[in-house]
Amino acid sequence: MKAAPPAHDVTDLGLSSEGVRRIAWAEREMPVLRLIRERFVAERPLAGLRIGACLHVTTETANLVRTLQAGGADVVLCGSNPLSTQDDVAAALVAEHGIAVFARHGEDRDTYYRHIDAVLDHHPAITMDDGADLVSRLHTERVGQLAEIWAGTEETTTGVIRLRAMAADGALRFPIVAVNEAQTKHLFDNRYGTGQSTVDAIMRATNILLAGRRVVVAGYGWVGRGVASRFRGLGSHVAVVEVDPIRALEALMDGFAVMPAAEAAPWGELFVTATGNVNVFRGEHFAAMRDGAILANAGHFDVELDLRALRELAGGREREVRANVREFEIDGKRLEVIAEGRLVNLGAAEGHPAAVMDMSFADQALAAEWVARNHASLERRVYTVPEEIDRQVARLKLEALGVRLEAMTEEQARYVTSWREGT
């Protein structure tokens, strides 16, 4: 007899069979996580450990959660963005894998925070965040639980920015492992994953031709680099808006135009934010944009486009013109916003390819194991993923792809470790 499902709040458990099929499809592209799961089954390094996760509820996340469960962890999951939850995946995790999930696609703000509280009601020892909302909730509304937390992990750039600010202020009350800072995460997930999935989402939502189109990318960090290069690869004319002189110089030398937002506003036809900051494009920029300009956000939170100013300028003249596209009329011209200004690759598409998330979530799983082993000695600060974990993930990925590395000769190894050899 099948066990009763755990506590949950999902849209429809009847969707679970479709979720099972799609989770299995993603698993084919996640060989590193599969190898880790096989080891976890044998070793049970997370036995009895409670993990509370606030992540995008997608097929790739499902395979991470299954890996943590295989290692012995008791996991409770909620969504980290109201538009990123895949309802069939949430149903499958509950019905087929016995994992407590609190996530519904399109949930309102109150439901979103009720689901975060449901995860924290489980009293986790480790938090897994994508945007630091669990950590923020613990430090503001549920401070009585802080002493229970061993450590947390953080998946995304925006969350790491928040957490480093907390640490700098002396406000952070438990250690955090910045999974986002692993090279196997930000070099690949942010650049290749977000680059491809952002373009995919915009094409799905609008069906516009990108060749010859003027695209403005705000921010030239790892995400901005990936987005800009993918648009250029499809024949777009790309300009970059940056505040950092080194990144601006890099963008220029990579062959992109660089200009301030005020100049980019009338020039561009498609605008994509990737900064992790607030109100990158504002009222004065919207007023200068051309008719038909399209706006999308590739950052985690829906704050990079000043939607309040846009609504004030439109004065109620707004409507949905396509699935995931809302049109605002300003003085006779139309501006189109994709996915409510939320994380576009998950709001209007399926997010990163599983092959990229394989590395990011391998980092997450191994970081959880590292915390379980070392939590007693960790300080209240933000840690980067240990280099040995980063290299292990890279080695496993290369092995899965059938790629072999060159090995140094004894002479070469001696040369690079000796100060006596040289000129």
Image (spheres, rainbow, N blue to C red):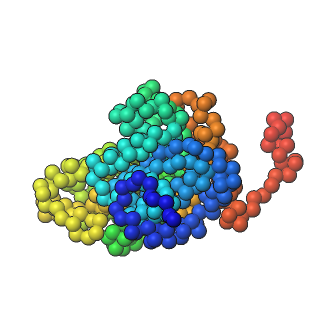
- Decide if residue 287 is on the left or right side of residue 14: left
Image vertical order of residue 68 relative to residue 354, above or below:
above
Residue at the image point whose x is 18% and y is 65% from the top:
319
- Decide if residue 198 is on the left or right side of residue 106: right
Q: What percent of the width, then of the height, locates residue 211? A: 40, 72
Q: What percent of the width, then of the height, locates residue 347? A: 36, 61
In front here: 242 or 103?
103
Image vertical order of residue 303 relative to residue 255, above or below:
above
Q: What percent of the width, then of the height, locates residue 81? A: 37, 53
Q: What percent of the width, then of the height, locates residue 402? A: 71, 66
Image vertical order of residue 364 relative to residue 322, above or below:
above
Q: Which residue sits furthest front?
A: 1
- Decide if residue 372 is on the left or right side of residue 102: right
| Residue 194 visible in the current orientation | no
Picture quarter with the C terminus: top right
In front here: 189 or 239?
189
